[in-house]
């Protein structure tokens, strides 16, 4: 099984480019997120303000997903990913202007716009896999992509906490912007066969729900993410603990940024271990 993963990474340059785009983009996201948690708390001292920020990170994507997924097949996956990367690279620099409490709403507005662009990037990124890997390689390709998310969360949160904690939040914001430029560089090298084919007609929502009724197991997978998000408020607790209860601070950096980053890094490790345990328990059984 291990050889399948190594072979895919070694022989498929298109998959490596797509994977690198995911890695650098998500690394930058965590650099920025840790810096924003600490910046909002330092400017407002309000847990409610951080909670609103977390809502701005998740709610717009849930709403936009109803349109961005079908749009992927109509516009083109590579174009949407490039559009999202360049848009976020420009928008994230706007965080640099937030230097006093009355400008905190700017963070919410910029974050909502970035999340909407991410809602374009993610479906296009996932839909690009069948274009660049064979049907036999879809399982290891998805496994690598999922494991990468966990690893990047652990590494990105830890490094993001160190960067914000030692150098300050502005450095983290600049690095996040640059990460989207690097991601766009890798995306620009992709050759996706579906982008050169006639656009498929847009499926209606009635057809989508009909498919889920006929495939209840797929429906269960669809519900898993929103159900988890109902308890996602625990991420607010991680932020408060990192800054208010067990802060680790370096001279000249953001208060508590290092400890917040470590909390989120441990979350990433847990997500990675969970996948390994799940595979041990269930393996590739289909029942």
Image: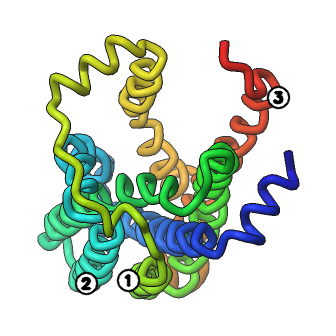
Are circles 3 and 2 on residues that touch, CB within 8 Å?
no
What is the residue that sits farthest to the front in this orientation? 198
* Quarter of the image that includes the C terminus: top right
Q: Which label is found at residue 90?
A: 2
Vertical position of residue 219 compared to residue 200: above or below: above
For residue 245, side relative to residue 3 (left or right): left
Q: Residue at x 86, y 51 (%)?
A: 2
Image location (x, y in percent) of residue 141? 64, 53
Q: Which label is found at residue 227?
A: none
Q: Is residue 172 visible?
A: no
Q: Which is more foreground, mark 1 or mark 3?
A: 3
Vertical position of residue 259 compared to residue 162: above or below: above
Image location (x, y in percent) of residue 94? 22, 81
| Badge 2 element | helix
* Quarter of the image that includes the N terminus: top right
Q: Residue at x 30, y 53 (%)?
A: 57
Instruction: Read off the residue under disc 1.
Output: 177
Q: Is residue 13 visible?
A: yes
**Closest to the observer, 194 or 224:** 194
Image location (x, y in percent) of residue 250? 61, 79
Q: Residue at x 44, y 59 (%)?
A: 128
Real-space Cα separation, disc 2 to disc 1, in angstroms = 7 Å
Vertical position of residue 136 compared to residue 160: above or below: above
Among the two numbered marks 1 and 3 on one chain, the one whose residue lies closer to the N terminus: 1
For residue 283, side relative to residue 111 (left or right): right
């Amino acid at each position: 099984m291990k050889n399948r993963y190594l072979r895919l990474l070694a022989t498929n340059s298109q998959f490596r480019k797509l994977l690198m785009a995911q890695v650098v983009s998500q690394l930058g996201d965590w650099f920025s997120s840790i810096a924003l948690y600490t910046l909002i708390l330092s400017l407002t001292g309000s847990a409610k303000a951080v909670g609103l920020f977390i809502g701005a990170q998740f709610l717009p994507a849930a709403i936009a997903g109803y349109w961005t997924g079908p749009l992927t097949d109509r516009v083109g996956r590579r174009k949407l990913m490039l559009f999202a990367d360049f848009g976020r690279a420009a928008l994230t620099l706007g965080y640099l202007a937030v230097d006093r409490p009355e400008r905190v709403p700017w963070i919410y507005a910029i974050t909502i716009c970035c999340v909407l662009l991410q809602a374009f990037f993610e479906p296009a990124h996932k839909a690009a896999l069948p274009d660049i890997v064979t049907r036999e390689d879809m399982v290891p390709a998805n496994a690598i992509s999922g494991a990468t998310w966990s690893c990047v969360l652990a590494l990105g949160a830890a490094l993001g906490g160190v960067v914000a904690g030692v150098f300050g939040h502005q450095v983290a914001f600049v690095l996040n912007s640059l990460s989207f430029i690097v991601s766009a560089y890798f995306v620009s090298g992709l050759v996706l066969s579906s982008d050169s084919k006639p656009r498929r007609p847009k499926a209606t929502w009635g057809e989508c729900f009909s498919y889920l009724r006929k495939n209840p197991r797929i429906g269960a997978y669809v519900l898993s993410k929103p159900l988890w998000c109902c308890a996602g408020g625990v991420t607010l607790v991680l932020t408060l603990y990192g800054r208010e209860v067990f802060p680790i601070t370096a001279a000249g950096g953001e208060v508590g940024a290092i400890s917040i980053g470590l909390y989120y890094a441990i979350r990433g490790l847990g997500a990675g271990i969970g996948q390994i345990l799940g595979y041990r328990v269930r393996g590739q059984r289909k029942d």
